[in-house]
Image (cartoon, rainbow, N blue to C red):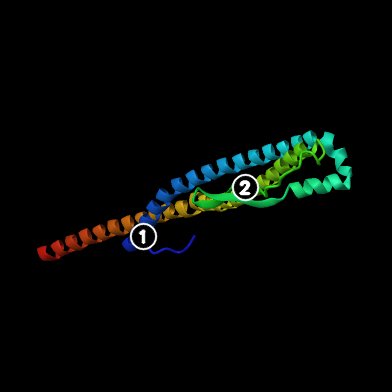
Amino acid sequence: MAKIKFTKTELKRQQDAKKQFERFLPILQLKKQQLQLEVRQCADALAANLAAQKQLQLDLAPTLRFFDDPETARAVREAVKVDHVETGENNVAGITIPTFGEVVFRPVELDLFSTEWFLDDAVEVMKRSIALREEYRVIECRHRLLSEELNSTGQRVNLFEKGKLPECRENVRRIGIMLGDEQTSSVARSKIAKKKSAEDAAR
């Protein structure tokens, strides 16, 4: 514990600091709870996304054998080209995190007469697979940023709860006792001096 001065000025400073910590601690605790909820929701979203990707792989399984043909594989690659990924931003507990919008693919016209019967379905499945992977990447980024902020906020909550606030309360208590003792001693000395003066005057 840092050395303190047992003065009225120091008492006022410690009391002000205590009030400030008591005011901000509930705000930090609320932020921590909000971040914990957001981190859990991100973890659930990541799990759901992975499950969707696995299901998509199962859906694609019947047509995978057709991709052994180089021409077919090339045709799918040509038909599925990402133009850009639309993302946004959201403010959660005071921090900016990315949000997933959609994957925009380059428009490609498939000639239904010259392509294999399964190519159209394969293209749609591939697009969905790419969209899920991009969504996962954004959710993973959200999860990382929120986790970092949660860790930082948790450290501040612990500092206030277990460090700064108890220290200020103890300082206020110690200074109050010391100043009270000094006031009592001062009153006692004053009474003794008055009594002595009265006795001297009576002689």
Q: Is residue 103 left or right of residue 196?
A: right
Q: Position of residue 115 (x, y in %)?
A: 81, 41
Mark 2, residue position: 143
Quarter of the C terminus within the rendering: bottom left
Q: How many residues crowd mark 1 within 10 Å: few (<14), some (14–19), many (20+)?
A: few
Q: Is residue 141 above or below residue 125?
A: below
User: Farthest left residue?
Assistant: 202
Q: Could you tell me which secondary element the residue under label 1 belongs to?
A: helix
At label 1, the amino acid type is: Arg
Q: Which residue is pictured at 45% across the width and 64% down the height?
A: 3
Q: Nearer the viewer, residue 187 or 18?
A: 18
* Residue 140 showing in the rendered view: no
Mark 1, residue position: 13
Q: Is residue 155 left or right of residue 183?
A: right
Q: Nearer the viewer, residue 143 or 63?
A: 63
Q: Which residue is pictured at 66% across the width and 52% down the height?
A: 83
Q: Position of residue 189 (x, y in %)?
A: 25, 61
At label 2, the amino acid type is: His
Q: Position of residue 182 (x, y in %)?
A: 31, 59
Foreground mark, 1 or 2, reads 2
Q: Nearer the viewer, residue 15 or 141?
A: 141
Q: Quadrant of residue 122?
A: top right
Residue 78 got which mark?
A: none
* Residue 192 showing in the rendered view: yes
Q: Is residue 44 above or below residue 152?
A: above
Marks 1/2 in contact by CB < 8 Å: the verdict is no
Q: CA distance from mark 1 to mark 2?
A: 40 Å
Earlier-in-chain disc, 1 versus 2:
1
Q: Is residue 110 above or below residue 176?
A: above
